[in-house]
Amino acid sequence: PAARRYLATEIDGDQPARPERRVRAGFAERVKNGPGFGDFVQGTSPPLTPAQALEKAASIPGNSRLPRWLKTDIPVGANVSRIRKTLRELNLHTVCEEARCPNMGECWGGGKHGTATATIMIMGDTCTRGCRFCSVKTSKTPAALDANEPDNVARALAAWGLDYVVLTSVDRDDLPDFGAAHFAHTVRSIREQAPQLMIECLTPDFQGQLPLVEQVADSGLDVFAHNVETVEGLQRMVRDYRANYKQSMSVLEHAKRHKPTLLTKSSIMLGVGETDAEVLQTLRDLRAAGVDIVTLGQYMRPTKRHMKVHEYVTPEKFAHWEHVGKDLGFVYAASGPLVRSSYKAGEFFISEILRKRAEAGKAMRNVAAEVAAQERKRTNAESAPTA
């Protein structure tokens, strides 16, 4: 046979012919006359509406897309910018920012009612505990307390012109009194510089030491709040090991017993795996502890490092729990997907102030100052030594 020439374009010698391609009868014709790209894009069904697409996506297991009732606007506005600027200048922190609250724009901007509310977080931005739902930074050895913080907070609040303020704090288990004296000092400073403000204190549990609870309760606040966070059976999974259900109930009960004129308040997160029976029992336990105000809201996962959302509770279910709270005898019950412990915090008080203003024809701030003055007068009378 003839020799081959490698890398040549032709091959010498006789070579067998390539077999012809077999094409299934009619296939080429069907492809030629079949559907085109446009038919695949268009599909055979009409396109989904945005609402239908969102509902379909939310029904897919593991899909992280939020239900429509949890969508909020990005916080903007002159009041939001002004408050944020003052916070940076005075080295102050808010739980609104640290906890990535979805209601910041509404609260800082005044919302539809025009009632501006802010939640100031004192004692730094680093917590000694590590609850699985919270996005606040943690450390066993946070920075020392800022001795100027009580005065800075009071000056900022006096300048902002707010109607209602919530003071909260990180847990400071590294301090001998867990920060109780600093908390009380801040409240007294606010009373001196902004007497018209309604003050709510959302406190730590002070590791259950009741004399420290009394120290804060006697500082001149209007509402003593401490969050139980979740039902009893999920405490260990949700909260830091140093917090527990009975300890939180004890703090709330003692604050009310020590100072009956105070309104006491607590909050429950839903969507972490609780049952309806457990929620009902928690509400009953809070009421038995003398708690006046309760809020219920949806747990929202801050980052992928935090515990997952077990369920997105519907607005209808939240409305159910609000009715249950009222039936159980709470003075005020707020329940909704976006409700937070400090969300619409001043609604109860502000509505009462507006009612008094309508009756007496006075300005809101004058009525608020009068209410605060009456509370301080009662506080001084109770603390005055007897002859």
Image: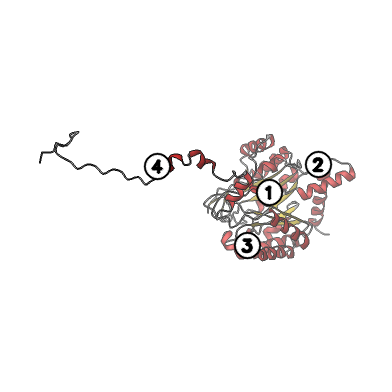
Q: Say left or right for 286 vs 135.
A: right
**Precedes in sequence: disc 3 or disc 4:** 4
Q: Give the vertical position of 67 relative to 259 (above or below).
A: above
Q: Amino acid at mark 2?
A: Arg
Q: Say left or right for 69 vs 4.
A: right
As drawn, the label of residue 274 is 3
Distance between the alpha carbons at the discs numbered 2 and 3: 42 Å
Towards the viewer: 312 or 339: 312
Towards the viewer: 72 or 171: 72
Q: Amino acid at mark 4?
A: Ala
**Precedes in sequence: disc 2 or disc 3:** 3
Considering the numbered disc 1 on the image, is that residue within a helix, a strand or a loop? strand
Q: Are marks 2 and 1 in contact (CB under 8 Å)?
A: no
Considering the numbered disc 3 on the image, is that residue within a helix, a strand or a loop? loop
Q: Position of residue 269 (x, y in %)?
A: 64, 56
**Precedes in sequence: disc 3 or disc 1:** 1
Asked whether residue 311 appears in the rendered view, the answer is yes
* Residue for badge 4: 28
* Residue for badge 2: 365
Q: Give the vertical position of 42 relative to 174 (above or below).
A: above
* Residue for badge 1: 167
Q: Are marks 3 and 4 in contact (CB under 8 Å)?
A: no
